[in-house]
Image (spheres, helix red, strand yellow):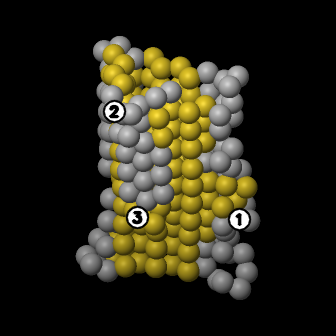
């Protein structure tokens, strides 16, 4: 266990002279945690939250977590950057989560970005992949997209679980799948672009899709499907 008092930072740097992984089991800080690996950042904990802090910054060249074993956190704010060598980004937070202003980026070609929050997720920094899939999901909270999301030829999936999905920035990907299983979806004067695939937007029973933005499919052979109890278009909205 690595532990630090309030207001202080825990910073761990792997050997910069070679590809070195950081393997984490339990890091606790009342301040911030910063992990910088020349290889990958790997979690050994199958459950719980091995990184507990107010903010966490992850930087690696060969991946940050995996599908089978994501980096599990209990933080307020997270940012992450993976280099072009290899790997995906998988981060699961136990409560509310804000993507900080420096955002989350995966430069590895086809590398995935997958962020999950137990509560509300607020995207305050750009999320960008190098043609890899980008996924944002919550268990019980709203998703607030306040900064652009760009997945290139990768797909975008957003699922607000039992909350709302509020789109206050542009989202661009090969295909789009946006859902609010219980709540509403609001697109506030921003653009949703599917470059080659379909666009699927679904609210739960008695849900509303309210848009004042633009929905674009660049491939005329692909569909735009909207499933909602109510569908409201306002302002300069168009499909």
- Asked if disc 2 and disc 1 are in contact, CB closer than 8 Å, the reply is no
Q: CA distance from mark 2 to mark 1?
A: 41 Å
Tag of residue 101: 3
To which quarter of the image does residue 157 belong? top right
- The structure residue drawn at horizontal position 51% and vertical position 67%, both measured from the top left corner, is 58
Element under disc 3: strand
User: Which residue is farthest front?
Assistant: 236
Across and down, in percent, residue 184 comes to 33, 27
Tag of residue 112: none
- The structure residue drawn at horizontal position 61% and vertical position 68%, both measured from the top left corner, is 60
Tag of residue 84: 1
Tag nearer the camera, 2 or 3? 2
The residue to which callout 2 is attached is: 235
Evaluate whether residue 84 shows in this view.
yes
Across and down, in percent, residue 122 comes to 36, 50
Q: Is residue 231 above or below residue 99?
A: above
Q: Residues within 10 Å of mark 1 (few under 14, many from 20)?
A: some
- The structure residue drawn at horizontal position 66% and vertical position 43%, both measured from the top left corner, is 154
Evaluate whether residue 93 shows in this view.
no
Precedes in sequence: disc 2 or disc 3: 3
Q: CA distance from mark 3 to mark 1?
A: 21 Å
Precedes in sequence: disc 3 or disc 1: 1
Element under disc 2: loop
């Amino acid at each position: 266990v690595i532990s630090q008092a309030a207001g202080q930072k825990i910073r761990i740097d792997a050997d910069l002279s070679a590809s070195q992984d950081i393997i984490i089991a339990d890091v606790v800080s009342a301040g911030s945690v910063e992990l910088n690996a020349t290889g990958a950042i790997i979690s050994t904990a199958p459950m719980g939250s091995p990184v507990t802090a107010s903010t966490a910054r992850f930087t690696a060249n060969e991946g940050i977590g995996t599908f089978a074993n994501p980096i599990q956190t209990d933080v307020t704010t997270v940012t992450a950057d993976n280099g072009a060598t290899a790997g995906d980004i998988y981060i699961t937070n136990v409560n509310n989560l804000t993507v900080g202003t420096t955002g989350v980026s995966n430069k590895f070609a086809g590398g995935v970005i997958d962020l999950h929050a137990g509560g509300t997720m607020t995207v305050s920094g750009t999320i960008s992949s190098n043609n890899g899939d980008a996924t944002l999901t919550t268990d019980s909270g709203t998703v607030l997209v306040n900064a652009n999301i760009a997945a290139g030829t990768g797909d975008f999936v957003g699922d607000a679980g039992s909350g709302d999905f509020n789109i206050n920035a542009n989202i661009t990907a090969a295909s789009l799948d946006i859902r609010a299983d219980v709540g509403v979806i609001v697109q506030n004067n921003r653009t949703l672009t599917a470059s080659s695939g379909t666009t699927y937007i679904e609210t739960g029973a008695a849900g509303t899709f309210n848009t004042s933005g633009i929905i674009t499919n660049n491939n005329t052979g692909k569909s735009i499907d909207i499933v909602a109890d109510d569908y409201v278009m306002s302002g300069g909205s168009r499909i």
